Image: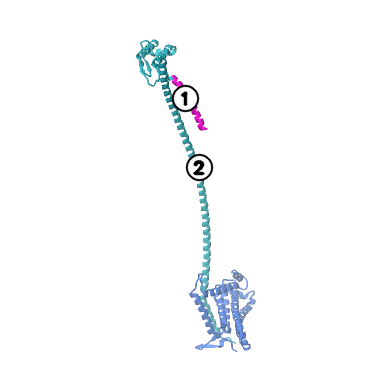
Amino acid sequence: MDISPDAWIVFHIGPVPVSATIVFTWGVMALLVLSALLVRLRLSSSGELTRWQNLWEAVIDTMRAQIREVSGQEPGPYLPFVGTLFVFIAVSNILAVVPGYAAPTGSLSTTTALALCVLIAVPLFGLARRGLGGYLRSYIQPTPLMAPFNVIGEMSRTIALAIRLYGNVMSGTVIAGILISIAPFFFPVLMQLLGLLTGVIQAYIFAILAMVYIASATRGRAGAGAEKGNRHD
Amino acid sequence: MQIDWITVAAQIVNFLVLVWLLQRLLYRPVTRAMGQRAAAIRAQFDEAARREAEAEAEAERLRLARQELELQRARMLAAAEAEAHELRQRLEAEAREAVAGRRAAWEDQLSREQAAFLSDLQREAAGHVARLSRRVLRDLAGADLEQTIAGIFLARLAALEGEALENLRLAARGAGGAATVSSAFDLPEALRDRVTAAVRDRIAAGLPVTFETDPEMICGLRLKVRGQTLQWSVDAYLDDLEEEMAEVLERSGALDAMNGAG
């Protein structure tokens, strides 16, 4: 049973095979950009809003509040990255109710790519906020002896992040497949509904974890950095 | 169940592109719009607070102005009342004064009328008495009144003595001394001779005596020698009569006044 959309090659661009994962990702991207354009074209800063703007304002406001709550910092610099993680994963998972659609997040390649993005983004945000010295010092906290463990921890949590998302999304598909073979009626529908819930929850967890990692990098594990970060509470 | 690294790379690129696009198209504009709206709402609240403060200040100012106005009105009312009071006092005083003046004028006129009446009465009474006396004297004695008067005058002249006589003689002896006999009517020639003889006999021999009539004299004779005078006339009696009549009038006037006051 092959349930990864990676194996589904839709077409080739030259020698490069384009899998269903990429195609559906583009579809999700197109949807998001289209709705963003709808908002952008009729953007209003007065009291009267379009429905799309209202929806997006609610989503963005909630995301900003969550980022502020988790990081204790102003959400401005983190919103594009963390927000896009949440929105992309959530929309990818919610679209799973559409027949013939395979969630890109059900591909280990996609989740790995997102996890790698987080892996790269965490030190970048740390460097941008604390400078090179400040960021590197966090690896030898509380003693230089801990440096290797800190590096291993950094790696392992990225991998865990990728596996967590992949496992949750894929497991939904796997469970649906198994249940269809056992009980063809009703249960798959319930599982699809459950999939909607877990999909949104996974998007939330992925984004929140990414924010937590970024926050820990920008705040430092202890000392002056923590105070600096907490000042925004 | 494997990782396709080409797909991984493509997904990383896809994700970064999506981040860039959403940042450009969604996050930045929407965040800015929300910020602008929040600022606008805050500005509206500020404006509302400012206007409220302004309105309160205006209300306070109006309240003070109204108080001032009421105070002013009360002041003006009090001033007007005082003025009216003063005016009333003044008018009353003037009216009282006017009434008093009119009363004084009336009383004055009354007294003048009284005097004129008395004078007329005196004249009338004297005329009556004279006429009466003349008729009585004529009827009773059969003699002219003038002669009787002259008789009385001559008797008085003959009875004259002492200082009064001396004064007359002294006046007659002075330079250009002349005697003037005034009467209310022309004396007959015989009576004139008698009077002239009596005067020259009593006062000074050869004294020139002139006769004249004086309508002011009612009834009687008057001898005048340079300021010294001897006379007999009904005037004295008339004066007595006048006094008595005046007394009577006074009494009846006082009675009227009392009745009027009562």
The mark found on residue B10 in the picture is none
User: For this view, does A168 lie left or right of residue B200?
Assistant: right
Q: What stretch is highlighted in magenta?
A: B236-262
What x and y, as percent, mark residue A4? 58, 86
Residue B49 is at least partly visible in this image: yes
Q: Chain A is drawn in which colour?
A: blue
Contact, CB < 8 Å: mark 2 with mark 1?
no
What x and y, as percent, mark residue B14? 53, 81
Q: Do labels 2 and 1 share a chain?
A: yes
Residue B229 is at least partly visible in this image: no
Residue at image position (54%, 88%) is A9
Q: What residue type is labelled 2?
A: His
Can you tell which quarter of the image residue B192 is in? top left
Q: Is residue B243 magenta?
A: yes
Q: Residues within 10 Å of mark 2 (few under 14, many from 20)?
A: few
Q: Nearer the viewer, residue A167 or B39?
A: B39
Q: How crowded is mark 1: few (under 14 residues within 10 Å), some or many (20 or more)?
A: some
Q: Is residue B153 above or below residue B115?
A: above
Chain letter, colour cyan in render? B
Query: Could you give the CA–CA distance between mark 2 and mark 1, rounded to whole angstroms?
Result: 48 Å
Q: Mark 2 points at which residue?
A: B85
Q: Which of marks 2 and 1 is nearer the N terminus?
A: 2
Q: Mark 1 lies on which chain?
A: B
What x and y, as percent, mark residue B194? 37, 12
Q: Is residue A17 above or below residue B154?
A: below
Q: Which of A8 and B123 is in front in this view?
A: B123
Q: Mark 2 lies on which chain?
A: B
Q: Name the residue under label 1.
A: B246
User: For this view, does B31 lie left or right of residue B202?
Assistant: right
Q: Nearer the viewer, residue A113 or A165?
A: A165
SS state under label 2: helix
